[in-house]
Image: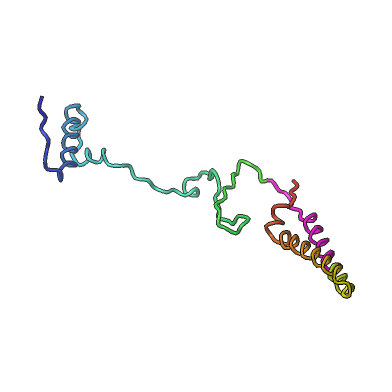
Amino acid sequence: MSMKINENYNHYKTDYAEELKTEQKKAGEIGKGKNDENASDKTAAPEAEYISSEKSGEKPSGLYRVGKDENGNRKLYFDDPKKPAEKCTANTDKVDKEIEKLKEKKKQLEQEIKAASEDEEKVRKLEKKLAQVESELSQKDNDTYRRQHTSFTK
């Protein structure tokens, strides 16, 4: 069995379109009051058109808005009108109290260091405690720590 291959690759689209028209004519789809231009429109892709909710008279299925996430990055939010929005309250009181206690401890240690300036060994111990408190304070006194340790209530 031999097969003939069209070696002219530039016309492969037109060859396919002509072959399709021939098959449609054989099937009786073309020739019922339609010209060949309408037949080629059948094979074209349908066009999409945007119709706003005001023009269509229908309510939108949802609402998208651009906002910022907890890190300040842009984020796309979807507000579903079918689901009621839940309100909750963020509470950072516990974290704020913890940070305030560390600041007070730091001040107290600084005062003790000034008072014990004659005893070098005691000063070293107090400075070591002060360094630990400052380290803990630097880890906790920032927005990231507050965000992670915030309590939410509905």
Q: Which residue lies furthest to the front in this view?
A: 121
Q: Examine the rendered structure and indicate whether residue 52 appears above or below residue 102.
A: above
Instruction: Please report the residue visible at 69 percent of the width from the left and 46 percent of the height from the top.
Output: 86
Would you say 32 lies left or right of 61 here?
left
Is 103 within the magenta?
yes
Spot occupied by residue 37 in the image (x, y as percentages of width and height): 20, 42
Spot occupied by residue 79 in the image (x, y as percentages of width and height): 59, 47
Q: In which quarter of the image is residue 31?
A: top left
Would you say 117 lies left or right of 31 here?
right
Prevailing secondary structure class for the magenta stretch in the rendered image: helix
Quadrant placement of the N terminus: top left
Count of marks overlaid on the render = 0
Instruction: Please report the residue visible at 53 percent of the width from the left and 45 percent of the height from the top.
Output: 60
Q: In which quarter of the image is residue 113?
A: bottom right
Q: Examine the rendered structure and indicate whether residue 33 appears above or below residue 54.
A: above
Is 100 within the magenta?
yes
Observer-nearest of 47 and 117: 117
Instruction: Please report the residue visible at 88 percent of the width from the left and 70 percent of the height from the top.
Output: 112
Identify the coloring: rainbow
Spot occupied by residue 16 in the image (x, y as percentages of width and height): 18, 37
Instruction: Please report the residue visible at 10 percent of the width from the left and 27 percent of the height from the top.
Output: 2
Q: Examine the rendered structure and indicate whether residue 39 appears above or below residue 68.
A: above
Q: Quadrant of residue 103?
A: bottom right
Q: Residue furthest top?
A: 1
Q: Residues in magenta?
A: 86-108
Observer-nearest of 109 and 36: 109
Would you say 74 lies left or right of 24 here?
right
